[in-house]
C-alpha cells in the first residue's frame, strides 16, 4: 500500500468477520455481528455495494503466515470495527438475496 494512502484506507481480512474463528485466530467483531465463513468475493461485493472501493491483494495473514491468502483494502469511513460490522451486515443481505433468487 502506498504511503499517501496510509490512513485513508484500511486492510480487512475475511477472518476478521468469520463466526467460526476465535478472537485469538483473528475475529475482530462480536459473534452476533460475524458471518459464517465469509469468502473474499463476498467481502469485495459488500464493499462495492457500500461504495468503499475495494482492492484485493495477495498476502499472508500474520497469525497464519504460512498460508497464502487474500486481503481486501477499502476506503476508511469511520472506525475499522464499524466498517467490519457494516460489511458483515451487507454480506448477510447478499446471502439472503441470493437465497430468495434461488427459491423463486
Image (cartoon, helix red, strand yellow):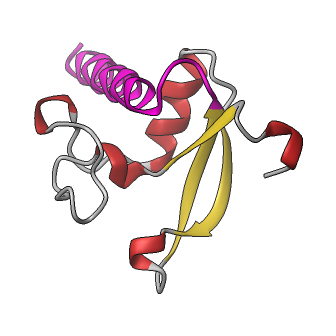
Magenta stretch contains residue 63: no
* Residue 17 percent coordinates (x, y): 31, 43
Would you identify the image quadrant in which residue 91 lies? Answer: top left
**Residue shown at the point (30%, 21%) measured from the top left:** 89
* Residue 96 percent coordinates (x, y): 25, 20
Q: Could you tell whether 92 is left or right of 44 in the image?
A: left
Would you identify the image quadrant in which residue 48 lies? Answer: top right
Point out the residue furthest to the left here.
32
Q: Which residues are magenta?
A: 75-104
Q: Viewer-proximal residue, 14 or 65?
A: 65
Q: Viewer-proximal residue, 101 or 2?
A: 2
**Residue shown at the point (48%, 72%) measured from the top left:** 62
**Residue shown at the point (48%, 81%) measured from the top left:** 65
**Residue shown at the point (72%, 30%) measured from the top left:** 8
* Residue 31 percent coordinates (x, y): 13, 39
Most frequent secondary structure within the magenta stretch: helix
Q: Viewer-proximal residue, 35 or 94?
A: 35
Circle count: 0
Point out the residue furthest to the bottom here.
66
- 16, above or below 102, in the image: below
Q: Could you tell whether 66 is left or right of 104 in the image?
A: right
* Residue 94 percent coordinates (x, y): 36, 22
Quarter of the image with the C terminus in it: top left
Amino acid at each position: 500500500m502506498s504511503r499517501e494512502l496510509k490512513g485513508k484506507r484500511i486492510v480487512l481480512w475475511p477472518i476478521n468477520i468469520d463466526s467460526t474463528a476465535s478472537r485469538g485466530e483473528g475475529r475482530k467483531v462480536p459473534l452476533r455481528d460475524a458471518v459464517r465463513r465469509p469468502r473474499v468475493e463476498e467481502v469485495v461485493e459488500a464493499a462495492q455495494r457500500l461504495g468503499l472501493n475495494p482492492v484485493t491483494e495477495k498476502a499472508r495473514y500474520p497469525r497464519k503466515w504460512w498460508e497464502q491468502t487474500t486481503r481486501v483494502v477499502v476506503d476508511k469511513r469511520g472506525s475499522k470495527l464499524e466498517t467490519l460490522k457494516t460489511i458483515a451486515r451487507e454480506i448477510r443481505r447478499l446471502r439472503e438475496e441470493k437465497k430468495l433468487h434461488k427459491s423463486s
